């Protein structure tokens, strides 16, 4: 995700002094409410980086930078606390999602430019460290439409697969899947939930991203919020979601991880998943 989305934008209506809402990125104007429905109708389409030139020197420099970031955050109190939370308070939820499977795939949407911005590098570092430290994390797939050839090659060197299809967040969780989506746009979370709006799919999902509780609080205070029409499934899933916020520990990691939570979805019946008008 580009810098304009990674650095969340303040809104006039706040739930607290530092409440923020993710708005559209790359300098585009906010979508009109009437256009929101179009986002959900976007179809999967082939994708490739828009640049075609390769630069081995640049790849080497970016790979070395990523290695420094991984080492730095791996030794931080933030990551130790983050890892401890997975191993203790939320581990049973991960185990429930895994069921009889031994591996949980990871899908990273909206990672942003790891070449240009620090928050994406920090976020990717966390994903790499989780892969290193938890043997039940399987393959990692990554997508962001702004990725360059250099960034794609570095991601592959790190052991990730870069998707060749823009799914617009609509991956069905046919098997245990962690969707790693810190600071993505609300529409992307909504697309993901809509695509998985069945009991047998929701139970396979773990989502790491913006706090759904905070979205709900924002809507309750801002009745005419510009993002309200993008939150139908996010608000509906709150009734059977278990959310656990993470602790950012220090200002060093605030921009990359503030207001982030783990979300797990408890078993529901088909009848509970009534149509959501989003």
Image: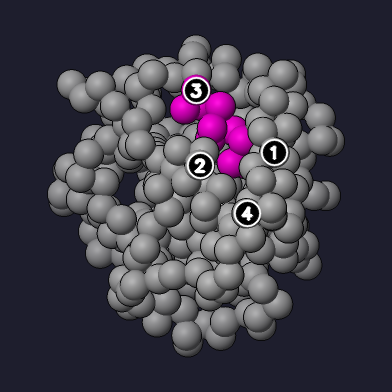
- Mark 4 or mark 1, earlier in chain: 4
Q: Quadrant of residue 43?
A: bottom left
- Determine whether 12 is above or below 251 in the image: below
Mark 4 Cα within 10 Å, few/some/many (few <14, many 20+)?
A: few
Q: Quadrant of residue 68?
A: top right
Image quarter in which the N terminus is found: bottom right
CA–CA distance in space, label 2 to label 1: 11 Å
Residue annotated with mark 4: 56
Residue annotated with mark 3: 132
Mark 2 Cα within 10 Å, few/some/many (few <14, many 20+)?
A: few
Circles 3 and 4 in contact, beta carbons < 8 Å:
no
Magenta: main secondary structure: helix
Residue at left 53%, top 72%?
A: 52
- Mark 4 or mark 2, earlier in chain: 4
Residue 64's label in the rendered image is 1
- Mark 2 or mark 3, earlier in chain: 3
CA–CA distance in space, label 3 to label 4: 26 Å
Q: Please, what secondary structure does the residue beneath circle 3 have? A: helix
- Determine whether 21 is above or below 141 in the image: below
Circles 1 and 3 in contact, beta carbons < 8 Å:
no
- Determine whether 65 is above or below 226 in the image: above
User: Where's residue 14, x and y in %?
Assistant: 75, 57
**Which segment did they paint magenta?**
123-132
């Amino acid at each position: 995700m580009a810098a304009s989305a990674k650095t969340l934008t303040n809104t006039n209506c706040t739930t607290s002094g530092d409440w923020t809402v993710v708005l559209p990125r790359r300098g585009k104007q906010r979508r009109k409410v009437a256009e929101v429905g179009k986002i959900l109708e976007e179809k999967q389409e082939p994708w490739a980086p828009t640049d075609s030139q390769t630069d081995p020197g640049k790849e080497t420099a970016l790979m070395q930078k990523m290695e420094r970031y991984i080492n730095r955050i791996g030794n931080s109190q933030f990551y130790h606390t983050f890892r401890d939370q997975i191993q203790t308070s939320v581990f049973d939820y991960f185990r429930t999602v895994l069921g009889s499977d031994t591996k949980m795939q990871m899908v990273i949407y909206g990672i942003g430019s790891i070449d240009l911005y620090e928050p994406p590098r920090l976020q990717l570092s966390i994903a790499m460290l989780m892969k290193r430290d938890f043997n039940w994390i399987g393959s990692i797939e990554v997508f962001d439409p702004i990725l360059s050839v250099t960034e794609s090659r570095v991601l592959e060197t790190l052991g990730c697969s870069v998707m060749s299809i823009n799914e617009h967040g609509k991956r069905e969780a046919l098997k245990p899947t962690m969707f790693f989506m810190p600071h993505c746009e609300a529409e992307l979370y909504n697309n993901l939930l809509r695509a998985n709006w069945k009991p047998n799919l929701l139970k396979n999902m773990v989502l790491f991203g913006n706090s759904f509780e905070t979205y709900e609080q924002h809507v309750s205070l801002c009745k005419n919020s510009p993002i309200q029409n993008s939150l139908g499934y996010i608000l509906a899933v709150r009734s059977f979601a278990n959310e656990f916020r993470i602790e950012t520990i220090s200002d060093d990691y605030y921009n990359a991880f503030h207001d982030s939570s783990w979300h797990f979805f408890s078993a529901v019946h088909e009848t509970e998943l009534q149509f959501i008008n989003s």
